[in-house]
Image (tube, rainbow, N blue to C red):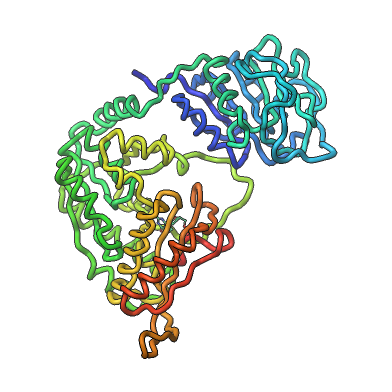
Amino acid sequence: MNIHDEMILILDFGSQTTQLIARRIREQKVYCEIHPFSVDIEKITALKPKGIVLSGGPSSVYDRDAPVSDSALFELGIPVLGICYGAQLMVQQLGGGVEKASKREFGKADLQVKVTDGLFAGLETDYFKHQVWMSHGDRVERMPPGFAATAISENSPFAAFRHMKRPLVGVQFHPEVAHTLIGNDVLRNFIFGICSCSPKWTMHSFIESNVEAIRRKVGDAKVICALSGGVDSSVTAAIVHRAIGEQLTCIYVNNGLMRSGESESILRFFREKSKLKVIDVDAEDFFLSELQGIIDPEIKRKRIGLGFIKIFEDEASKLGDVDYLAQGTLYPDVIESVSFRGEAPIKSHHNVGGLPEVMKLDLIEPLRELFKDEVRELGLELGLPEEAIYRQPFPGPGLGIRIMGEITSERLEILRKADVIVLEEMKKSGYYRKVWQSFAVLLPIQTVGVMGDFRTYENVIAIRAVDSKDAMTADWSRLPYEILQIISGRIINEVRGVNRVVYDISSKPPATIEWE
Ligand code: XMP
């Protein structure tokens, strides 16, 4: 079975919610891909989409350098749904009128459905009944020839519209966001009603087709994979192992910067339950000596990253001929999204990204079509334990970037003990899975305290807990005071060398999630 033969193509005009459109469509078990708006018409035809979605975007269609797609895409006979900017572009390219609105329409609006087939099949037509979410400064003023309105809002007589004969539809609101209460109905009507897709993109079918593809690609060659204990590398290893069994060897590098018990459970699972071959390298001393005296966060990150590559390469070379490296790249890293902001890297991230160039191995990236939530679903389907699947993200440089200043084994010991308490209490209270990340940071600056009758002069632990959707932005979690109180009390009582606990109340931006 080819799970990609019914695909929805999303053309990205730079909206912050383009990825959400893709996720909403995939939640309906229909495969979709995001491509830049500028993709040429030959490529579109070659992809054979069952439908095309034009995303929103920050531009105005009448800007001189406004992003436009080839208008020939409206002539292919393939259904097209324009969203916000995408809808306005459709109007403009097909001969209607779009103008700057006197008032920007932003936030919730009430929609009245006028035509209850097509996009609004099954929805009621009561007076301004449906809450939708708008975000635009332009208005559609005039329909192109052959088009008519299908819904109105208080601010717009053309809040949604369609061509009377061809499968071209547009909405000025954003069906992909949660505030649009009828958003899923609208997307479902588009993909199933108008595009005639069927719901066959399931993790079960994904496994079947990928296992086949990996076997075909690898033949009898050898594959290696860096196992970190995190979700992505665990799921990558599990699916590659399902495909080629013994031909896969995983390498787990203990850099001495892991949390207490961090990776043992996942290693145990792989070794005992799934009979995966794992080489477990204890490189703690090597990393600690590499990091001795280093204070600068960027140098720390670089040393940890390079050290990892060195150890990994050494181990891999002992295996003899290896042809492939399996890697847990996810879809958000693959999408060539249209970014209208020039973004400079803030921190040099360490993951296995540098390995393929150094080792000159071909890549196997079984997750490159998946979003994080799909990876979790896949992991469960492959039988990984829930604990491994719902693990919070943990950075490649580990505790190394959670100790300010020099990393020493004493400091690591203090931080590990404090961190165990944070995690225990977060799990006990049910907040572990409610927040994006929660952890302890060691500030090796001494402050004065009093314990019993004695003056103390010891370290500070900062607690960081954040809410986020994708780590690009984050806000500090409003944890109940009771949980903070328990965590603080336990750390000060149970961890020697700490006499003060503080809570980090900075959002990202301007702070970052990790402290270094
Ligand atoms: P920041 O601190 O940049 O972190 O706000 C954003 C997210 O990325 C994680 N992080 C890393 N992950 N290698 C990784 O694999 C790294 O070098 C790294 N640095 C930060 C961080 O935990 C958060 O989830």
Where residue 130 sits in the image (x, y, percent)?
67, 27
Q: Quadrant of residue 2?
A: top left
Residue 161 in sight in this render: no
For this orientation, the residue located farthest to the top is 165
Q: Quadrant of the N terminus?
A: top left
Q: Please state if 493 lies on the left or on the right of 509 as rendered.
A: left
Observer able to see residue 495: yes
Left or right: where 174 falls relative to 515? right
Residue at the spot x=31%, y=78% of the render? Answer: 496
Horizontal side of 135 relative to 368 (left or right) equals right
Residue 480, compared with residue 154, is above or below; it is below
Q: Position of residue 386 (x, y in %)?
A: 30, 43
- The quarter of the image that holds ligand 1 is bottom left
- The residue lying toward the viewer, choosing from 341 and 200, is 200
Quadrant, the C terminus? bottom left
Who is closer to the viewer here, 102 or 428?
Answer: 428
User: Which image quadrant is residue 120 in?
Assistant: top right
Question: Looking at the picture, how far across and down is residue 300, in whole percent?
Answer: 38, 69
The residue sitting at the right extreme is 102
Identify the residue at image location x=17%, y=36%.
Answer: 245
Q: Position of residue 462 (x, y in %)?
A: 44, 70
Q: Residue at x 58, y 53 (%)?
A: 343
How many numbered marks appear? 0
Could you tell me which residue is drawn at 77 percent across and 35 percent down?
138
Frontmost residue, 313 versus 96: 96
Residue extending farthest to the bottom is: 454
**In the image, is residue 15 above or below residue 433?**
above
